Image (cartoon, coloured by chain):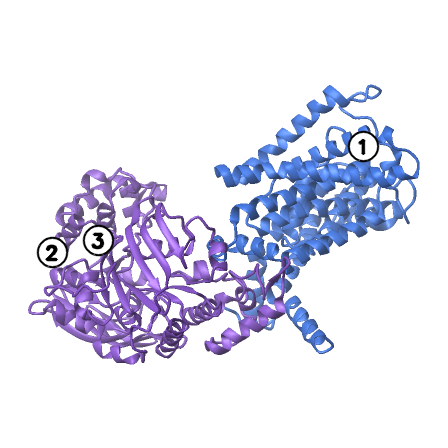
């Protein structure tokens, strides 16, 4: 067997954040390799390096034993590397044929006409050879296809461009269980004909089922490479999560929380942007001085839940209460006025106006009330002082309040947002991925601040795709899967392996002790 | 306070010198210059094609009917040469600032108000009708004090209501405001013509024209010769209004809400901005401002409503684009467009140059301003050749 892809000592830095730290990875030709890790572990960054979207800060990429220096995906495609992104890169109103040939059309009549007949022959042949079953759909607009079929169009598109190595980014995220099985069949068809597959995932079961080899990343570093055969889920979960990090947070004994419920959610149902039910029948209550963590793989309804609690999105049914008062019918501004702090999952879309400087961003959400807003006017002096205070306390770099938010790195944007939100002196804190993209030191500091909020008697709801974070912070943990809570357990009762399995929608072999779950 | 002032001043200066603002001024200035140069070429070209008895220019043995230098000189004279010409320029500038504001403010909230023309036309009619109705009831020195505010108020209210309509259509039913405001222009003109024909037509004049508004309600020239249709106090009030809108956008919660909504809708929702309210409100404000312009057009310029009002509402869009949709920028942009209009009239009857050529010049200015990338590319190339020192760090 020869090596199809070899990454040696790949390091990728974004300013002061290290996304990949001397990562090594070898993939044999004709095999399926899983790249496993939590959100933010650096999986996608590593694959973007292989696909030519990023240039590595250090390290070398070899494809088929040749040193590859890709400046763009075009170079990668030319070298036989194709990537199927999580969000498909298809033109939805255009037909399957048009999408596959787009940009690579064979032409006749001196370039005036695409050679549809030739496209058809080639595409049909490829579809048949790899069992993709698209031969009858060439004239169908992509928007009429299921997600699974669209993915197959992407595969066919890569094949048409001559790909030998396929990178799949979270390929099962949008698929139904049946479609997942079909996808794995396609993996077999491809490898049977000497194609090589790398797929990014954070689902243990998938890695074990579909892959031959598994490389595990954590915090940008490779923590291990194992054979799928002979490895257990528990071993993988342990590698992926890294239990020694557990001891990092120095937290007061649990049970310090008061008796008063400050945030309660009952029977909540929320629809997402596509009109699909995203949250169903969720109940949770958070006492003052308590942190409740919501663990789960991204896209299992955490975002709509947070948005409905904080008033960014309307709930379809159910009630949200702050300090016993129903706020479901209140506007976002009214909820903010009742002592809500909200760190959203998407800071660049929601939490910051990218073109505004930090002074102007410092008042977002408080622009209408003292100390910033008085009688309809905004006191920019107070805003500047506030921006400077947040920058100082949260070590936002560069420490210049006149810079537009756009010019800060993601981690520094996040620090600024967390700082602004927690400085509201909130009673209810809802934080989605509070440390996404920030460096280790700032991560600790943000964790300390969240624990301080808890000490001050706020009810804190933390959503994170990182198990570490949830386990470190939470007094209780709710595990969310497909829009509902699978289980609510005391923070110290569950092992991370068990939680990891719950997150993946699988029941652990040993039952998790259920505690004060409600 | 004494310590804070220099700091504040320094900050203001720093912001004023901010790259984007400077860039915008440079781009606008360059656009005007390039438009004049391209316009000169077009003048030569059309002068070469046209036939005339006395060619104005001989170059390399070829005769041209128009001499660009003479044309631009005549334009300048026509715009600024005499007090009468200056008055016309300033009058157009004043009105263009109003219709420019009517585009700029919704634009900052992320809305395209193409409906200033309709708001202007209906408001002009409202002003006329209210003054015709109220005129006979008041007389003497109080008449002006009553009629002027009533006339302006009537224009602002009707203009505001006509802005409310597309605002509500958008927030309630999701109607795209570009389409609704554009079409409402035609409706406004049609409705106004019908109303005037049925109820307010002046029987002594042929055509769709109302009777003239009372003398007491017309805004008299001051510092300018009698008969000119421009009033200095109106311009002063307009400049105050511009300052007021700058203050509104930059110093108030509503202005902040407008700007956040225009920049990033999701961030506005996150920040507790009621986007429906801000959308409707900015459309109403825009309509009211366009309406004030319509009222002023009646009270300062024509003294009645007549069919075929000038397309100031549409020109306002161009003025606002040239101004970077910044209220303060409307003043120089309005002056330029006012001068192009009055100068265009002058070269038309002095040199016999078709006024359409002036429209071509205006079109060129807008086209070039709307193409800032062109100037950036040129700037970057100059920079690479080492002829320009890089201005600050270039961000990727």
- SS at circle 2: helix
Q: Is residue A335 visible?
A: yes
Q: Is residue A330 above or below residue B307?
A: below
Q: Colour of chain B?
A: blue
Chain letter for mark 2: A
**Where is residue A436 shown, x and y percent of the image?**
35, 68
Task: Write down the residue under mark 1.
Answer: B131
Chain letter for mark 1: B
- Tag 2–tag 3 contact (CB < 8 Å): no
Task: Write down the residue under mark 2.
Answer: A188
Badge 3: how crowded within 10 Å, few (<14), some, or many (20+)? many
In the displayed structure, does residue B29 sit left or right of residue A31? right
In whole angstroms, how far apart are the C-alphas of marks 2 and 1?
Answer: 84 Å
Q: Residue at x 21, y 49 (%)?
A: A152
- What label does residue A177 carry, if any? none
Extreme-left residue of the structure: A230
């Amino acid at each position: 067997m020869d090596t199809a892809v070899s990454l040696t000592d790949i390091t990728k830095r974004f300013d002061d954040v290290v996304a990949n730290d001397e990562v090594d990875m070898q993939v044999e030709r004709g095999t399926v390799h899983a790249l496993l890790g939590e959100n933010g572990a650096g999986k996608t960054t590593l694959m973007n390096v292989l696909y030519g979207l990023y240039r590595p800060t250090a390290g070398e990429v070899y494809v088929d034993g040749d040193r590859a220096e890709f400046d763009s995906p075009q170079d990668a495609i030319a070298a036989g590397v194709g990537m199927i992104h999580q969000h498909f890169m298809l033109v939805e109103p255009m037909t399957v044929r048009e999408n596959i040939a787009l940009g690579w059309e064979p032409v006749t009549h001196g370039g005036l006409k695409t050679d549809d007949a030739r496209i058809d022959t080639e595409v049909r042949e490829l579809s048949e050879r790899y069992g993709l079953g698209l031969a009858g759909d060439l004239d169908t607009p992509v928007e009429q296809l299921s997600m699974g079929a669209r993915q197959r169009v992407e595969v066919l598109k890569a094949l048409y461009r001559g790909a030998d190595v396929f990178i799949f980014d979270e390929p099962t995220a949008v698929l139904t269980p049946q479609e997942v099985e079909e996808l794995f069949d396609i993996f077999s068809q491809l490898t049977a004909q000497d194609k090589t597959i790398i797929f990014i995932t954070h689902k243990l079961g998938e890695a074990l089922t579909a892959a031959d080899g598994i490389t595990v990343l954590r915090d940008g570093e490779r923590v291990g490479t194992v054979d799928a055969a002979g490895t257990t889920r528990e071993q993988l979960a342990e590698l992926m999560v890294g239990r020694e990090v557990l001891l990092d947070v120095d937290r007061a004994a649990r049970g310090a929380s008061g008796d008063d419920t400050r945030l309660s959610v009952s029977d909540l149902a929320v629809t997402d942007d596509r009109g699909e039910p995203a949250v169903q029948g969720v109940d949770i209550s958070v006492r003052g001085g308590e942190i409740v963590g919501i663990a789960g793989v991204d896209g299992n309804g955490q975002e709509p839940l947070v948005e409905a609690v904080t008033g960014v999105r309307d709930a379809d049914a159910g009630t949200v209460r702050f300090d016993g008062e129903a706020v479901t019918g209140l506007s976002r501004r009214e909820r903010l006025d009742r002592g809500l702090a909200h760190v959203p999952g998407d800071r660049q879309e929601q939490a910051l106006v990218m073109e505004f400087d930090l002074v102007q961003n410092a008042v977002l959400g408080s622009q209408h009330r003292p100390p910033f807003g008085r009688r309809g006017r905004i006191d920019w002096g107070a805003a500047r002082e506030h921006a400077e205070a947040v920058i100082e306390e949260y070590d936002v770099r560069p420490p210049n309040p006149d810079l537009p938010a756009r010019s800060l790195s993601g981690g520094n944007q996040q620090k600024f947002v967390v700082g602004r939100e927690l400085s509201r002196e909130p009673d209810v804190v809802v934080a989605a991925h509070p440390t996404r993209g920030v460096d280790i030191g700032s991560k600790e500091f943000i964790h300390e601040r969240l624990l301080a909020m808890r000490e001050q008697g706020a009810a804190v709801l933390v959503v994170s795709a990182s198990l570490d974070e949830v386990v470190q912070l939470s007094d209780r943990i709710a595990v969310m899967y497909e829009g509902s809570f699978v289980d609510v357990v005391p923070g110290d009762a569950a092992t991370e392996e068990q939680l990891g399995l719950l997150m993946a929608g699988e029941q652990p072999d040993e039952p998790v002790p259920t505690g004060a779950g409600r | 306070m004494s310590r804070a002032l220099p700091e504040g001043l320094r900050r203001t200066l720093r912001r004023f010198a901010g790259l984007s603002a400077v860039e915008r001024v440079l781009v606008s200035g360059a656009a005007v210059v390039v438009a004049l140069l391209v316009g000169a070429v077009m003048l030569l070209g059309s002068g070469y094609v046209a036939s005339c008895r006395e060619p104005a220019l001989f170059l390399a043995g070829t005769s041209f009917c128009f001499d660009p230098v003479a044309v631009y000189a005549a334009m300048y004279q026509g715009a600024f040469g005499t007090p009468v010409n200056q008055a016309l320029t300033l009058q157009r500038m004043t009105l263009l600032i109003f219709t420019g504001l009517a585009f700029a403010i919704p634009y900052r909230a992320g809305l395209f108000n193409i409906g200033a023309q309709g708001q202007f036309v209906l408001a002009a009619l409202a002003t006329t009708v209210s003054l015709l109705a109220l005129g006979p009831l008041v007389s003497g020195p109080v008449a002006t004090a009553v009629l002027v505010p009533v006339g302006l108020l009537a224009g602002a209210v009707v203009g505001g209501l006509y802005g409310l309509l597309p605002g509500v259509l958008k927030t309630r039913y999701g109607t795209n405001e570009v389409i609704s405001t554009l079409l409402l222009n035609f409706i406004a003109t049609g409705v106004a013509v019908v109303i005037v024909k049925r109820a307010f037509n002046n029987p002594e004049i042929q055509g769709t024209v109302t009777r003239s508004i009372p003398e007491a309600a017309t805004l008299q020239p001051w510092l300018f010769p009698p008969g000119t249709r421009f009033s200095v106090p109106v311009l002063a009030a307009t400049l105050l209004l511009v300052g007021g809108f700058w203050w509104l956008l930059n110093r108030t919660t509503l202005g902040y809400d407008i700007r956040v909504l225009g920049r990033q809708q999701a961030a506005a929702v996150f920040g507790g901005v009621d986007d429906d309210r801000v959308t409707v409100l900015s459309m109403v404000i825009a309509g009211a401002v366009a309406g004030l312009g319509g009222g002023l057009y009646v009270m300062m310029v024509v003294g009645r409503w007549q069919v075929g009002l000038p397309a100031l509402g549409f020109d306002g869009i161009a003025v606002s684009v040239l101004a970077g949709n910044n209220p303060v920028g409307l003043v120089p942009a309005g002056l330029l467009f006012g001068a192009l209009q009055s100068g265009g009239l002058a070269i038309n009857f002095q040199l016999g140059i078709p006024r359409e050529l002036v429209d071509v010049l205006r079109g060129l200015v807008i086209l070039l301003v709307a193409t800032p990338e062109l100037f950036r590319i040129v700037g970057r190339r100059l920079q690479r050749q080492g002829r320009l020192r890089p201005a600050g760090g270039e961000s990727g």
